């Protein structure tokens, strides 16, 4: 009829986990039952992450003849009681175990001032019955205020309280009730020597209702309720035997002279009835009775009496929770946390029973060597990792689309970024590119307007137009880098940039080659005269440009660029960029441009002292020097940046190198055309 004690172990563990108590002390009776309890409980606690601050066996007897051993036990128990970190104590034992604990507190502080220093939560595996007899009647009970007790499930049985109100020792002559009466009322019915030590004599008319709660409760306890149900289960079984035999013999049978106890078993297994409390009594498949455990919260009052209180009700022995073994696994325990009254020292705040404080989000638990696993140090999460719960064993990384916040308590969605015309950097680069585009357009318009003047016609007027148009396209190509990456823009970015620059540099190379060939052809008998003219210049531009076109075509057909989201380069941003597809082709384009630029620089440098018209070879030398400086600096800058900065570096290189060509080659000529027109005459060429 009593529920299996294993269910109680599960309930205690769930209770500890419910309140987060992972550092507890255990007091167990020093007998076979206590050893069995510790043997079963310790592995279960460890599996659920609960550590034992200590385990203390409580003797069942006090051997006063060996005072040193007696006080050693008192000292050990006392030290465990004042453990500042363990605020939850699990107690397994009978009345003697509670008496020992109470005696230790009394010896430490006989003036009963320990209510604050002994603010603990006592979890009692067994109910406290008849614990304040003899000398302990006058001791204060504040240390047990707010204790939680697991008791066998019970209900109020009709007529039981009335029965206790009228029962007297004179009604029962078996001696049992007299012994109980003497212990409860601290009196004696006899005149023996032992009775002379007791000041009062029992008259047998004392009222049980006048006794304090811890001494005697008028409500039926869990054990008594189980006995009550057991008696009725046997009665119903005997009744069933009577019925079965009456049917066989056709006559009533009320005596069982040949009945053996084991013959009740098959009738007990099938018994089913409702008791006077309205609860069904039956046996399950594993021969266990119904019901589980009630969880009671004990509150002490100044009159040194216990009461058990439940939220919303004023009567005694009312539950604050229950343990139902038939509930789904993990949900056997039901507890009304708000209805529990804790020890006054906790100020009605949930007590903590931990080896150390909780590790809050943003920290993880680092274990201490040589100490229980419940003891740890709280360490901040490393870079790019978070913890979003208390007491996490390790930090973890956010998903690719998120990054840790500053407190490392959670993940924040990464914004998708790319260089646009809506931000300051994009506006600055776009404004610069447009400014130079308009300047170049003005230069082209000036050259077209004064196309018949000597300074425009010198060094191949058509090459000048080709160079200026290609530079205009170079400035415009930078806008492919200042918009959201897409399939089309990614395909056109590098190829347009590479082809337009190749045409521009090829035009400059053709200009320098024209100057050199012209002076070489002036020598008598030179074979270079057949190369003088527009055919050499345009064949140079066309062949050099077509080779770059071929590289770009091969690139776009084999491994074209495409838009992608770069999740990893930046910790707090997702970079929306163009993947070049094949970096080799990209650097081939740059390398080929570098070869053309170096060839133009070398030829212009060699021809810088030739009597060129308005010394254009010298201007080309400076322009190529500036151009090469920009793109030599571009490579390390490009490789060392990510995201928007990488795109900005390339746009800056395009705009600055194009501006260098315009400024070094054409602005000196425009200055003469606009501000010094007297120098723009054929006579100046002949000087």
Image (spheres, helix red, strand yellow):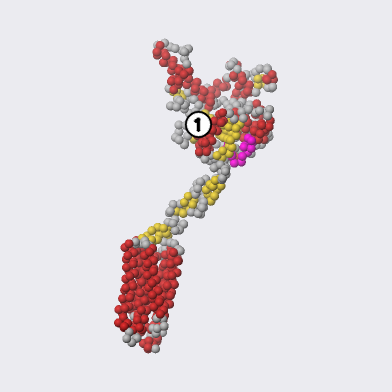
Residue closer to the observer: 11 or 586: 586
Question: Residue 543 at what x, y percent from top left?
Answer: 32, 73
Q: Is mark 1 on a helix, strand or loop?
A: helix
Q: Give the range drawn in magenta.
A: 76-89
Question: Residue 453 at what x, y percent from top left?
Answer: 35, 84
Question: Residue 550 at what x, y percent from top left?
Answer: 32, 68
Q: In this view, does 179 lie to the left or right of 229?
A: right
**Residue designated by label 1:** 6
Question: Residue at (57%, 20%) from the top-left corner?
Answer: 166
> Is residue 27 located in the magenta-colored stretch of the structure?
no
Crowd band around label 1 with a 10 angstrom C-alpha radius: few (<14), some (14–19), many (20+) = few
Residue 549: quarter of image: bottom left
Question: Residue at (40%, 14%) from the top-left corner?
Answer: 247
The C terminus lies in which quarter of the figure?
A: bottom left
Q: In this view, does 488 lie above or below 614?
A: above
Residue 169: quarter of image: top right
> Is residue 82 located in the magenta-colored stretch of the structure?
yes
Residue closer to the observer: 131 or 491: 491
């Amino acid at each position: 009829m009593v529920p299996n004690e294993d269910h109680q172990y599960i309930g205690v563990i769930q209770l500890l986990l419910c309140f987060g108590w992972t550092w507890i002390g255990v007091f167990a009776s020093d007998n076979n039952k206590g050893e069995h309890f510790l043997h079963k409980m310790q592995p279960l606690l460890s599996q659920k992450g609960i550590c034992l601050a200590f385990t203390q066996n409580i003797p069942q007897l006090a051997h006063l003849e060996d005072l040193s051993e007696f006080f050693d036990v008192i000292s050990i128990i006392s030290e465990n009681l004042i453990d500042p970190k363990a605020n939850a104590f699990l107690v397994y034992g009978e009345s003697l175990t509670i008496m020992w604990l109470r005696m230790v507190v009394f010896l430490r502080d006989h003036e009963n001032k320990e209510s604050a220093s002994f603010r603990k939560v006592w979890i009692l595996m067994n109910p406290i019955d008849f614990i304040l007899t003899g000398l302990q009647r006058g001791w204060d009970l504040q240390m047990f205020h707010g204790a939680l007790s697991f008791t066998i499930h019970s209900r109020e049985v009709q007529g039981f309280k009335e029965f206790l109100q009228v029962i007297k020792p004179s009604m029962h002559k078996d001696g049992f009730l007299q012994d109980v009466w003497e212990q409860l009322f601290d009196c004696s019915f006899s005149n023996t020597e032992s009775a002379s030590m007791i000041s009062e004599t029992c008259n047998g008319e004392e009222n049980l209702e006048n006794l304090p709660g811890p001494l005697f409760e008028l409500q039926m306890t869990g054990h008594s309720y189980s006995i009550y149900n057991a008696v009725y289960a046997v009665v119903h079984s005997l009744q069933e035997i009577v019925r079965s035999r009456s049917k066989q013999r056709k006559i009533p049978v009320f005596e069982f002279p040949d009945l053996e106890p084991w013959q009740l078993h098959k009738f007990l297994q099938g018994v089913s009835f409702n008791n006077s409390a309205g609860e069904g009594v039956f046996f399950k498949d594993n021969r266990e009775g119904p019901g589980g455990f009630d969880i009671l919260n004990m509150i002490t009052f100044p009159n040194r009496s216990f009461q058990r209180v439940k939220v919303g009700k004023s009567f005694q022995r009312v539950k604050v929770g229950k343990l139902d073994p038939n509930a789904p696994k993990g949900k056997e325990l039901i507890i009304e946390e708000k209805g529990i009254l804790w020890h006054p020292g906790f100020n009605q705040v949930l007590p903590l029973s931990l080896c150390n404080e909780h590790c809050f989000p943003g920290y993880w638990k680092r274990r201490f060597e040589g100490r229980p696993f419940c003891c740890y140090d709280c360490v901040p999460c490393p870079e790019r990792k978070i913890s979003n719960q208390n007491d996490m064993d390790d930090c973890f990384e956010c998903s690719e689309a998120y990054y840790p916040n500053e407190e490392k308590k959670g993940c924040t969605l990464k914004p998708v970024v790319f260089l646009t015309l809506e931000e300051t950097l994009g506006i600055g680069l776009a404004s610069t590119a447009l400014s130079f585009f308009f300047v170049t357009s003005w230069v082209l318009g000036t050259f077209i307007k004064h196309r018949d003047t000597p300074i425009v016609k010198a060094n191949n007027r058509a090459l000048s137009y080709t160079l200026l148009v290609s530079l205009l396209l170079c400035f415009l190509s930078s806008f492919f880098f200042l918009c959201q990456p897409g399939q089309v823009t990614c395909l056109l970015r590098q190829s347009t940039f590479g082809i337009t620059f190749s045409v521009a540099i090829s035009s400059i190379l053709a200009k320098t080659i024209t100057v050199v060939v012209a002076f070489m052809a002036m020598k008598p008998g030179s074979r270079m005269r057949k190369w003088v003219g527009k055919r050499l210049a345009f064949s140079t531009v066309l062949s050099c440009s077509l080779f770059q076109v071929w590289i770009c075509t091969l690139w776009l057909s084999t491994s074209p660029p495409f838009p992608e989201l770069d999740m990893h380069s930046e910790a707090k941003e997702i970079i929306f960029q163009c993947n070049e597809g094949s970096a080799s082709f990209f650097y081939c384009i740059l390398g080929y441009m570098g070869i053309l630029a170096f060839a133009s620089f070398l030829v212009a440098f060699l021809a810088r002292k030739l009597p060129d018209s308005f010394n254009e070879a010298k201007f080309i030398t400076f322009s190529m020097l500036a151009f090469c400086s920009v793109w030599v600096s571009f490579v390390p800058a490009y490789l060392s940046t990510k995201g928007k900065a990488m795109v900005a570096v390339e746009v800056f290189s395009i705009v600055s190198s194009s501006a260098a060509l315009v400024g070094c080659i054409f602005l000196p000529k425009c200055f003469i055309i606009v501000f010094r027109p007297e120098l723009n005459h054929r006579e100046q060429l002949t000087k």
